[in-house]
Amino acid sequence: MSKRIPESELIINPDGSIYHLNLKPEHLASTIIAVGDPDRVQKVSQYFDEIEFSISKREFVTHTGIYKGKRLTVISTGMGTDNIEIFMTEIDALVNIDLTTRIPKNNHTSLDIIRIGTSGSMQAEIPYGSLLASVFGIGLDTLMTYYITDFSDFERSVSREIREKLNLPFTPYCVEGSQKLLNLLGNDLIKGNTVTCPGFFGPQGREVRLKPAIPNIIEQLSAINLDGFRLTNFEMETAGYYAMGRMLGHEMLSLNAIVANRITQEFAKDSYNIVDQLIVQTLEKLAEK
Ligand SMILES: O=P(O)(O)O[C@H]1O[C@H](CO)[C@@H](O)[C@H]1O
Ligand SMILES: O=c1cc[nH]c(=O)[nH]1
């Protein structure tokens, strides 16, 4: 029998909701769309036929409703893999732990979680305006240092290559996303491998007033080619999602609206339209499922 999880480790609010997300199990659909920007939640749920529940706490805004007969939850996470760790742990607890007894359930529930986010391309041939599904996420953050992970030989070889190339003082991580969701949602999108950074500026090679410590990070990463495996885009959450999703047993796919091209140094003037296109076609495919 699993052990009871103490009050200090899994925090339940007085109303029975989970600490940061402010949600109870009944508020959650089994298919979840995750976005970074809290304002993007409404940009997704505006297409719902009805919204049955909405709540917000900190950067976590949630709307649950029905789109063409399919129950969906859309939640914002804010930016960065530290938020993703909280989001994934609490969302998993809502379905896989009995919050009254604080004991993990015997039967595991697997959620379908789809990130709809913005991202910058590091390949000239992937212009802004493109829609890209992440086959792998590569984390340049240190979140996975704190977990017992299970990466494949191939994933480890990618991490090693990047560590050596960038001369990093820690080992990055590489994780494959859900093949099931990729087949369902990614067939007509560009397939890429997404680099997740612990920041928007220096870690992605942007120089505003501060000089990044890793020289030519964009050129170095975009030049990697391991038997055809290439890195395509930068953002700040995908690898954290993929790693947490694998460890917790959920299907996880990251979809990226490419709003910048870092090689041609262009940024889309119509980034909201690009995101909207990705939202509409993803909802449509989920409804057909
Ligand atoms: O558009 P979202 O989902 O926030 O994603 C991207 O945009 C943010 C940076 O502007 C980071 O969170 C990055 O991952
Ligand atoms: O270049 C970009 C664009 C969006 N989000 C990022 O993290 N980087």
Image (cartoon, rainbow, N blue to C red):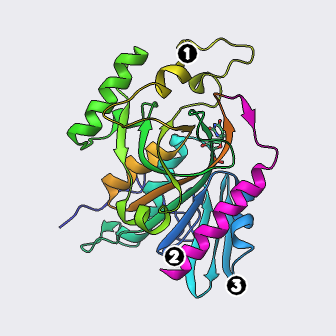
Are discs 1 and 3 less than 8 Å apart at CB?
no
Mark 1 and ligand 2: say if the CB distance to the nearest ligand atom is below 8 Å: no
What amino acid is found at the position of numbered circle 1 in the picture? Answer: Asn
Of the residues under marks 1 and 3, which one precedes in the sequence?
Answer: 3
As for residue 279 lying within the magenta part, the answer is: yes
Of mark 3 and mark 2, the one earlier in the sequence is 2
Q: Position of residue 183 (x, y in %)?
A: 41, 65
Q: CA distance from mark 1 to mark 3?
A: 48 Å
Which amino acid does the dot numbered 2 rest on? Ala
Q: Report the mark closest to the observer, 2 or 1.
A: 1
Query: Disc 1 or disc 3, which is closer to the eye?
Result: 1
Residue closer to the observer: 136 or 42: 136
Which residue is under mark 2?
A: 29
Q: Residue furthest left?
A: 1
Q: Which mark is residue 50?
A: 3
x 46%, y 55%: residue: 88
Can you identify the residue that label 1 sits on? 216
Task: Determine the secondary structure under disc 3.
Answer: strand
Residue placed most toward the observer, 10 or 34: 34
| Residue that lies at the very extreme toward the bottom in this rendered image | 69
Residue positioned most to the right: 269
Residues shaded magenta: 264-289
Asked if one can make out residue 159 in the rendered structure from this viewpoint, the answer is yes
Q: Is residue 64 above or below residue 36?
A: below
Q: Residue at x 69, y 38 (%)?
A: 260
Give the residue type at disc 3: Glu
Ligand 1's image quarter is: top right
User: How many numbered marks appear?
Assistant: 3
Q: Which residue is drawn at the image coordinates 34% and 72% (left, top)?
A: 109
Q: Nearer the viewer, residue 231 or 93?
A: 231
Label 1 Cα neighbours within 10 Å, binned few <14 / some 14-19 / many ≥20: some
Q: Could you tell me which residue is drawn at 51 percent across and 79 percent down? A: 26
